[in-house]
Image (cartoon, rainbow, N blue to C red):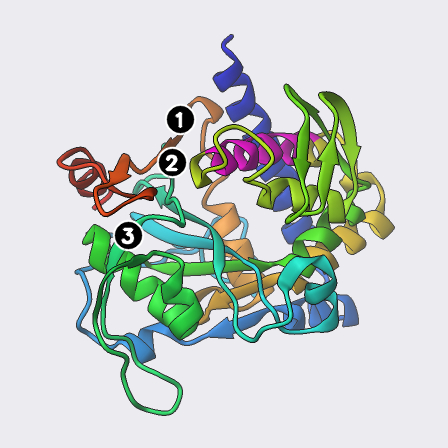
Amino acid sequence: MTEKKRFRGRAVKAAGVVLGCALVLGGAGAGWVYWHLDHNIHSVDIDSALGDNRPARADRAGPSPSPSASASQEPVEKGVLNILVLGSDSRSGKENKKLGGGDSGGARSDTAMVLHLNADRSEATVVSIPRDTLVERPSCPTESGGTTAVAYGVMFNSAYSLGGPVCAVKTVETMTGVRMDHYLEVDFAGFAKLIDALGGVDITTDEDIDDDLSQLHLTAGPHHLDGRTALAFARTRHGVGDGSDLGRIKLQQQLVKALADEVSGSGLLTSPTRLYQVADAATGALTTDTGLDSLSKLSGLARSLQGLSGDSVKTVMMPVVPAPSDRNRVVADEPEAKELWESLR
């Protein structure tokens, strides 16, 4: 078995444990635990903000109940789905500032991925979008009721800084031509809390990492990372490789692998206390669209993934080349990028 297949298998095992968390906690019904976790989740009404001027939805069947779903559970969502997943370096709140969010207002999308699920959930593709990609940022609605101006040749992550989740989704849809059916965001403090609730993660570095900006200093070799250090590992770019965002994406993929290992081997379902701690951290870290803004809705999505095979999860990065105008930035490599996005429609 190849290393990639082993990783995919571990990732699906981890998804199974997370699914178990959702189903067990979802079974709490109207109890305080369910109420607390449900109210942890923040949401943004992206569909209402963007209206109908968007790419068409992929052909898909309407929601149908899972055979095992109880009256308190949402139906399993069927059909092709594309989900934009962002990791944000929010500047709001003392905890986020302590973890590197900075002193200025606003936030950026440090990590961006499109998760594509095919209609019968037999295959999944995860596409990473480098934050340094130069794109056309479309006109986006603002909270005050106005709109932003169209901008050309700006960094991808500026969309989130300017207009939050709504503008991030519209920018991805403009650059890909693919409708984002859902949105998931995890912030600095929430990610660190999740890692700490799991007891940390184990990684091995091939080289020394010395990055004052992310406050990460590791010698080559094995390390056990707590939440703060794992977050720095996910964010570092200047202390490893060529210092580009492409190198950071590789580290993030390594961290996802370590996180999957930790979740799948942690025995969460045998410890109600740890299960609650992890679920509390996970739900508290999330901002979603209104289509996924409850524990029952997230459980419905999770149940639809039960039949997904580990060998059918593909991870890729959007094809890019150095930007002619700035060698420190990248642009989509065409026609390869267009062909990739067309395969997800």
Residue at mark 2: 124
- Amino acid bearing label 3: Leu
Q: Nearer the viewer, mark 3 or mark 1?
A: 3
Instruction: Indicate which disc, 3 or 1, sits on the residue closer to the N terminus.
Output: 3
Residue at 64% in and 44% down:
18
- Amino acid bearing label 2: Ala
Q: How much space separates mark 3 and mark 1, taking CA atoms?
A: 31 Å
Image location of residue 259, percent across then percent down:
66, 36
Residue 114 lies left or right of residue 248; in this view the side is left
Residue 240 lies left or right of residue 130; in this view the side is right
Q: How much space separates mark 2 and mark 3, taking CA atoms?
A: 26 Å
- Residue 312's disc number: 1
Q: Is residue 188 above or below residue 253?
A: below
- Amino acid bearing label 1: Ser
Asked whether the viewer can see residue 157, the reply is: yes
Which region is colored magenta?
247-261
Image location of residue 221, percent across then percent down:
74, 19
Instruction: Indicate which disc, 1 or 2, sits on the residue closer to the N terminus.
Output: 2
Residue at mark 3: 134
Q: In what element is the residue under mark 2? A: strand
Outermost residue on the top side: it is 1
Image location of residue 77, percent across then percent down:
39, 55
Query: Is disc 2 surrounded by few (<14), some (14 to 19) or many (20+) residues within 10 Å?
Result: many
Q: How much space separates mark 1 and mark 2, taking CA atoms?
A: 6 Å
